[in-house]
Amino acid sequence: MNNIMPAKKVNQSPGINAEAKIKAAARVVFHKKGFAAARTRDIAEEAGINLALLNYYFRSKEKLFELIMFETLSGFMQNMAMLFNDESTTLEKKVEGMAEKYIDLFALEPEIPLFIMSELKNNATGFIEKLPILNVIMKSAFIRQYQAAVDKGKITEPNPLHFIMNLMGMVIFPFIGSPMLKKIGNLKDKQFDKLMQERKKLIPIWVNAMLKAK
Amino acid sequence: MNNIMPAKKVNQSPGINAEAKIKAAARVVFHKKGFAAARTRDIAEEAGINLALLNYYFRSKEKLFELIMFETLSGFMQNMAMLFNDESTTLEKKVEGMAEKYIDLFALEPEIPLFIMSELKNNATGFIEKLPILNVIMKSAFIRQYQAAVDKGKITEPNPLHFIMNLMGMVIFPFIGSPMLKKIGNLKDKQFDKLMQERKKLIPIWVNAMLKAK
DNA sequence: TTTATTTTTAATCATTTGATTAAATTATTT
DNA sequence: AAATAATTTAATCAAATGATTAAAAATAAA
């Protein structure tokens, strides 16, 4: 049969690279609807291509999803890995970096947090196990610095996981709960965005205070 | 004479029970998979009833979902409304109450937070608009107490929405991010549960420190 | 009992949806 | 240009899925 993987090719005249258009469309649709609610026809329409092309280039909805999921997860983790393993910065600077990088990222693509958390719960293709970064976080420079600060009495809570939960909760949750939060605060999108920008500076201050609380 | 004792399916539950069984099963399946990924056949199987019964009692998958969603949301909001509007307790006590009630709730049903946030994003049936509670939170006793504390200089951040985001983030996010957090911390379910129990006491301490940070 | 009503089931329908095929079109190579 | 290869499309398939129907079974009413 003709289950031939298509050759890469420079495509110039009619529409630009159809494969790239499908991938970009898949990213949009999957992020917006999640795997289960996304239809291949949605993706084809978003990409402006014939439905058969999707299977021609990516073989199946599952394969295409795995690609998008892996790229999305990698983008998400890259920031974390960089910041956590930077030996040259203080704990405080790492928190500032986390807040700034992630709020910038999610301000551009607000659907990423809920997408990642939802699809990781299913973990249909074992994504969690395929993320080596997660295994080394607890051995990162960040964790060593945290432990040292605990030993010196500069941080009250000895378990760094609580700290990670709090930091991620403060940074990520507003994007996950935005529909509810916008309703509670009667916020337009612009006002919400402004709040998120404020949080880039506020979260490090709050976190600093928390670390010394007892 | 009627000596026919039909030993057919006497032990099968009667009808008024079937409706309740379907509803309970729908709650389990919808919470676990979300609306899009849940199949009516999943629900029928979970309930141990014939598929046609689902439509007989609830007319459609959508109608059944709306029922479950509404009940789940109401349960979620009830705690919040009670605590926010209690004139007799201090801000600090309200925070303690929030942490305790919600962690207890989510420890029993850990899928609720992600379920609610995911389905609210779609907001297919306008759930958000149908929740009057959300409209009155900003006029609650909690908010008045917050503003008073800001005026007295006891709280640094003037916008109570930041506070709500932080509190919800710290309480709710760990349940939303549990697959990732369990992997990072190499935690078994029991260890994770223990961390959540710890947070009932820790969150009020952290929040207290945050409020005075500057 | 007998009749009527409610509940349950098996079978089936109609639509949706992921995927395939064969042909048409476009591009590249000779 | 002719031949070959790559890309795209229209048409269709097959399975999944929400929903319906008609009949059977159980229950209540007479």
Image (cartoon, coloured by chain):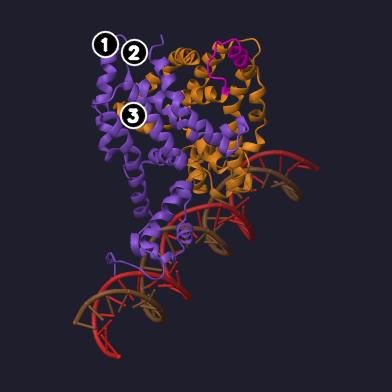
Chain colours: A purple, B orange, C brown, D red
Whether tag 2 and tag 1 are in contact, CB under 8 A, the answer is no
The residue carrying pointer 2 sits among few (fewer than 14), some (14 to 19) or many (20 or more) residues within 10 Å by Cα, namely many
Where are the magenta residues, as a range?
Answer: B145-160
User: Which residue type does callout 3 highlight?
Assistant: Lys
Front in this rendered view, residue B116 or B212:
B212
What residue sits 47% from the left and 26% below the top? Answer: B169
Whether tag 3 and tag 2 are in contact, CB under 8 A, the answer is no
Per the model, the C-alpha gap separating discs 1 and 3 is: 25 Å
What residue sits 45% from the left and 42% below the top? Answer: A108
List the residue tagged with mark 2.
A155
Taking the magenta stretch, the answer to whether it contains residue A12 is: no
**Which numbered marker is on residue A151?**
1
Whether tag 1 and tag 3 are in contact, CB under 8 A, the answer is no
User: Which residue type does callout 2 highlight?
Assistant: Ile
* B211 sits to left or right of B144: left
Q: Is residue A113 visible?
A: no
Per the model, the C-alpha gap separating discs 3 and 2 is: 23 Å
Instruction: State the SS at label 2.
Output: loop
Image location of residue B147, percent across then percent down: 62, 16
Instruction: State the SS at label 3.
Output: helix
User: Which residue type does callout 1 highlight?
Assistant: Asp
Front in this rendered view, residue A109 or A139:
A109
Q: To which chain does the residue with label 3 belong?
A: B
Q: To which chain does the residue with label 2 belong?
A: A
Q: To which chain does the residue with label 1 belong?
A: A
List the residue tagged with mark 3.
B182
Per the model, the C-alpha gap separating discs 2 and 1 is: 8 Å
